[in-house]
Amino acid sequence: MFTLIKKWIVGILTVLLLFALQTSAFRYLPFGRSVPNFILIITCMYGLMRGEYAGIITGFTCGLMLDIFCMDILGFYALLYTYVGFFCGLANKYYKKEDYKLPAAAIILSDITFMLLKFFFTKVLLGYFDFKFYFRDSILPEFVFTILSGIIIYPMLLFTETHFIDYTSDKSDSGSEGGAGVL
């Protein structure tokens, strides 16, 4: 029971911290117009570390917060991040905490897919077809910043998972297999 509560508290605090960094603090740093996608990183990592259900809940929650605070359309980011969390969660059975290749590959694939879908649904459907300009000015800088941020954030998330949440103390707290304690 206590492990489940710690898991939720750590997850919620991490999501809120990274959401605040992405939507406020990093907007004023001199990166140009690009900001690292911390929400994508946390969704990928929780999907990988905790399973597809955790990835879905984290992705939906983070996406809905972005929709409410930053978008005109409610549900767009919630849907995209839900899919990111689900597909990263499918790779949970291959995840080993000492292997950094799978988290890096998950962030890379998720970010590329996310940015291409975002371009298609927010630009192409509105008649904007200049992909080279959008790639150079938006996709590439955000991709680089997200990858570099993911390399820095992953060990921190791994540290919180292994040191603050002791999974070995009470394994019966998880309820169903891979389902409880999502955030």
Image: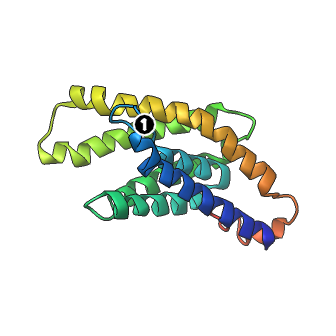
Q: Residue at x 60, y 47 (%)?
A: 45
Image x and y of residue 141, in percent: 38, 29
- What's the amino acid at mark 1? Leu
Q: Position of residue 164 (x, y in %)?
A: 78, 55
Q: Residue at x 26, y 62 (%)?
A: 73
Q: How many marks?
A: 1
Colour theme: rainbow
Query: Residue visible at 37% across and 36% down?
Result: 34
Q: Do we see residue 105 in this rendering?
A: no
- From the image, tell me which residue sits under label 1: 29
Q: Position of residue 21 (x, y in %)?
A: 49, 48
Which quadrant would the C terminus be assigned to in this image? bottom right
Say if residue 109 shows up in the picture: yes
Give the answer, above or below, for where 74 lies relative to 106: below
Q: Secondary structure at mark 1?
A: loop
Quadrant housing residue 159? top right
Q: Is residue 47 left or right of residue 96?
A: left
The crowding category of the residue bearing disc 1, from other C-alpha atoms within 10 Å (few below 14, some 14 to 19, many at least 20), is few
Q: Is residue 124 left or right of residue 101?
A: left
Q: Residue at x 51, y 32 (%)?
A: 147
Q: Looking at the rendering, in which quadrant would you find the N terminus? A: bottom right
Q: Relative to 14, is 174 on the left or the right?
A: right
Farthest left residue in view: 127
Quick check: 143 left or right of 102?
A: left
